[in-house]
Image (cartoon, rainbow, N blue to C red):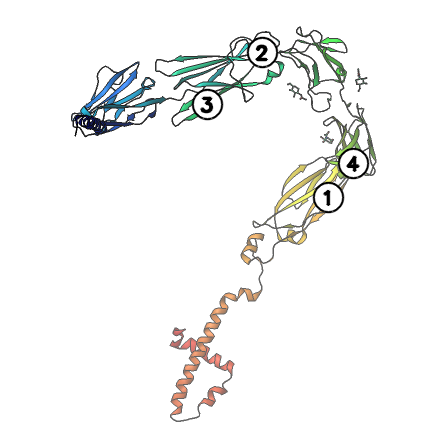
Amino acid sequence: MDGKAFGRTSLLCTLLLGALRVCSGTVTVTVSPKVEVLKGETVKLPCSYTVSPPSNNVVVEWYIEQGTRKRVAFHSGNGNGRIDEGTPLTHRSTFEEDFTLKILSVQPSDELVFYCQVTAGPAGVSDASTMLKVFFPPEKPQLTRPSSQAISVGQTTSSQIGSCLSMNGHPQPRIIWFKNDQPLPEVKDVKANTYMIPSVVKEASGLYTIKSDLYMQPTKEDKDSVFQCIVEYSMPGDQVKQEKSNTITINLYYPSEKATFSLLNTTPVKEGDNVTMKCETDGNPQPVFEFTKNKAPVPGESGFLRIPSVKRTDAGLYTCTAMDFDNLDADLSGSINLTIQYIDPVNVTPAEPQVVMLGDKVEWQCKTKASAPHTVQWKKGSEVLSQDGTLSIHAVTYDKAGVYRCVGAVPSVPGLTAHAKVNLTVKGKPMIEPPEAAEVGKDGAVTLKCVADGFPLPQFTWKPSGKESVQVETNSATSTVTLQATPEILRDGVTCEVSNEFGKDSQVFKVTQKEADNSADRVLLTGNPVFEPAEHKQAGSGGVVVAVVVCVLLLLLLVALIYFLSKTKRLPCSKKKGKDVPESEKVNNETSLIQKGPATEQC
Ligand SMILES: *[C@@H]1O[C@H](CO)[C@@H](O)[C@H](O)[C@H]1NC(C)=O
Ligand SMILES: *[C@@H]1O[C@H](CO)[C@@H](O)[C@H](O)[C@H]1NC(C)=O
Ligand SMILES: *[C@@H]1O[C@H](CO)[C@@H](O)[C@H](O)[C@H]1NC(C)=O
């Protein structure tokens, strides 16, 4: 090998060695490039590394970037991790064994770049950075109207419409304006018609409070526009969220172009109604109105003209007029031709109560006038008797007596009616309505009702008499009597007699009693014992007779047996005698036996 060759070899070696050295002396640090956390929570910033060649002397340190790098924690290989004094993290963080930097109660000011730096002696130094992102949702935005007066249309400068405020967000949120649910493009040029003036305040907490004032030159169309603002903010995981404010409208002044005068009553106006007429313009605010009736001024009240309980004389031509100083050319007037429907009180002839004799004729006339075609009806109760104003009754009966009403009505105007009443009394002799048969009750009493038509009201007489009460109606009376049912009443009934100055009437009321009563009940009803057929009377002793007969027959049988047994020893055909004895004789024999013999005791 010559010198030159050696030199080359040596250079190559050096290069190789150098390369080897570079290859073997490597430090690789691994961190999360971005860590996101909500304000107030705890965050962990992990750090790991590889070193080659392996080294026992590795130092791991965490730095923050605040203009310059500042160390916040370090770990010297074999010892424990330590937190540096005098940094923003000093009392809120720990350095874990696995080189994770743990920060408690994260603040917006912790949003920094963190470096994990690893120094491994001969292997060298390396670091990696973590961006810590801190989030906090802002409060619901508050939209307010400026305290100043209404905004007039047609002004040459823009006016403030509203102010939107959203407090305490992180990172800084943004405000978007909406008019009638359409977003307004963000314009900051104050020479534009519509623009926004944004502002932001960083609170001591590190959170952002943002505000945006909206300026516009509203037109009349904006009188009903609805304004709203929305705050848009970021949350971990690239989320973008929004929160809506309350809504506002503009208190907008715009000139009137025409007036409307309208009747608020929904049904045809009739006498007695309360009438309300309203005058308004299409401008804002409403001007002051003046009202007239048939050209004479009448008082109104802020656009309303009210007439309580109108009369027909209130009909006429009403007008309202107004003056708008922003629009002097406009004709701001309206008119209403008020018509009032009416019906006169009905007039009945004859007006006095009518008293007629049974069978006579009676007639009434009923008349009225109204503002529109009307009807006249005669009614008794709900029954319609006549449609033409004349009510005549030929040959009146008692049931025609009572109150008759004449009702006048205007069908085209609901509720427009007039009424009158007349009273018909029918005089005559009393007449008892067909009686109903009455039944005796459990207590032995019977109640009877005698209904008699007639006027003057009749007097009642009951035969026989009992406890009476009388109920009186217009042309009839009812007498109720309660009496104890006697055999005479059951046989002859009870008589009801009625009479007045024109005559009398009488009716017999039959009294019956229920069938299938037992004797005990009958005794109770009449108060006297009731005669009963003999067989019924002896029913109780019948049982004793049967028993005695059976006993006698048995005894007879016994005697016959003894006799037969005693005879068989001497006379084998002794049966004959027993059979020949007549039945009646047998009974007689036995009866005597019963009276004498001890065998009776067995019965
Ligand atoms: C009219 O108004 C008065 C007072 O408000 C009220 O008492 C009355 O019932 C009203 N009349 C009608 C027909 O509505
Ligand atoms: C108002 O109405 C009445 C009845 O409908 C009519 O007779 C009268 O001419 C009207 N008046 C005006 C001024 O229109
Ligand atoms: C009708 O006349 C009768 C008899 O005179 C009287 O009792 C009644 O009160 C009167 N009714 C009316 C509504 O006038």
What residue did someone put label 3 on? 243
Does any portion of residue 46 appear in the rendered image? no
Instruction: Name the secondary structure under disc 4.
Output: strand
In the depicted structure, whether residue 55 falls above or below residue 469:
above
Q: Between residue 211 and residue 238, name the one nearer to us.
A: 238
Q: Which badge, 3 or 1, comes first in the chain's sequence? A: 3
Q: Which residue is mark 4?
A: 385
Is residue 489 visible to the viewer in this orientation of the structure? yes
Mark 2 CB near ligand 2 (8 Å cut): no
- The amino acid on which the numbered mark 4 sits, given as a three-letter code, is Leu
Residue 162 in percent (x, y) is at 51, 13
Q: Secondary structure at mark 2?
A: loop
In 3D space, how far apart are the residues under numbered discs 2 and 4 (Cα atoms)?
74 Å
Q: Horizontal and vertical percent for residue 522?
A: 57, 55
Rendered view: 260 above or below 423: above
Dot 4 or dot 3: first in sequence order is 3
Closer to the chain start, of discs 2 and 4, is 2
Q: Position of residue 412 (x, y in %)?
A: 76, 28
- Which of disc 2 and disc 3 is earlier in sequence? 2
Kind of residue sitting beneath label 3: Glu
Cα distance between the residues tagged 4 and 3 = 75 Å
**On the rendered image, what quadrant is the C terminus found in?**
bottom left
Estimate how packed mark 1 is, as few (under 14), some (14 to 19) or many (20 or more) residues with alpha carbons within 10 Å: many
Mark 3–mark 1 distance (CA, rounded to whole Å): 90 Å
- Provide the residue designation for mark 2: 217
Instruction: Identify the mark nearer the N-term, 2 or 1.
Output: 2
The local crowd at label 2, few if under 14, some if 14 to 19, many if 20 or more residues have their Cα within 10 Å, is many
Identify residue for label 1: 432
The mark lying in front, picked from 2 and 1, is: 2
The type of residue carrying mark 1 is Ile
Measured along the vertical axis of the image, is residue 258 above or below residue 502? Answer: above
